Image: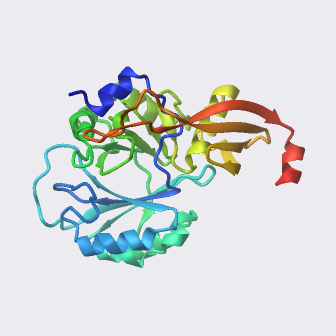
Amino acid sequence: MSTCTTVSRQLDEPFSGTAATARTWLLIEQPGPWGAKALTSSHLDPALGRALEAAAEGTGVRIALIRRPGRHADCDSLAERQVYVAHTIPGNAWVHNAMTRDPGNLLDLDFSALGAGDPHSFDEVLQGRPHTGDPLALVCTNGKRDRCCALLGRPLAAELAASGVGGIWEVTHLGGHRFSPTVLVLPYGYAYGRAEAHTVKEILQGVREGRIVTEGCRGNSAWERPGQAAELTVRTASGDHAADVLTVIRTDGSAPRWEVTVAHSDGRLWRVVVARGASLPPRPESCGSALGSPARMDVVAVRQLEATAVAVAC
């Protein structure tokens, strides 16, 4: 039986506008096995996992577990664990890191402030500080959610780590199993599909240079999916791949059609019309799932605007 990834590749399913949505990511190191809902089905205390989920709800913060690539001992405890928080809004993209012996301290974080881009509670509660090391590349490897993530993601993470690439972590869930291996790169928050080791290295080098690689890109997690598709289209149309220069400032309409306004830091503006289509023929969104027609974000029109006209409208 074909995997969901094989079918997606055969149908050349487009990536744009398929990234998970989160303004801020909170990443908690947790080795050992992960279940399908890892926050409550791993060696992390499930009561703590439920409490963290409740604390983050509606704040723009998405919580995921991470572990280092390689063999995973079935351990019940971790003396000290790595924690990252990353904000992805252009112009204020950052990563802070900390070590903690008690993950219960995470409940003292101000999740609303973190979602809004303020790291002060993280730094105060966990003695965190700005991350000055390599950009982070999170490879989805959770086979309990979809076998493709384990079969394709784990070898990719291991190859990258073995080749000396820094900042590589396995992560519990990035969505879009059929695009495995899937990778999220921080601080800028762009997700990628069908990733290979050499392309991830190119993407990370781009991040170090303040440049976004658009090939294989699923979108920026800072935006809802119509905004993701619109921003990637403007990058291609303008030929500007510098990080932090494009911002989705407005989205009008609702499914199945939106008008998205994308602004450049130099004052240029674009209006992008995005329509929700259905991927045909039907295919599985995940291994073992029934055939369906996953939603896709189709850009149907792009127009550059006069900045003054939009400024008045906004």
**Residue 169 versus residue 206 in the image, above or below:** below
Quarter of the image for the C terminus: give it.
bottom right
Res 119 seen here? no
Residue 176 in percent (x, y) is at 39, 41
Left/right of residue 144 with respect to residue 97 in the rendered view:
left
Residue 172 in percent (x, y) is at 30, 51
Viewer-proximal residue among 298 and 292: 292
Residue 171 in percent (x, y) is at 31, 49
Viewer-proximal residue among 298 and 137: 298
- Quarter of the image for residue 104 reads bottom left
Give the residue displayed 73% in from the left and 31% down from the top: 302
User: How many numbered circles does the render carry?
Assistant: 0
Give the residue displayed 10% in from the left and 53% down from the top: 73
Give the residue displayed 50% in from the left and 27% down from the top: 215
Left/right of residue 99 with respect to residue 304 in the rendered view:
left
What sort of colour scheme is used for the picture?
A: rainbow
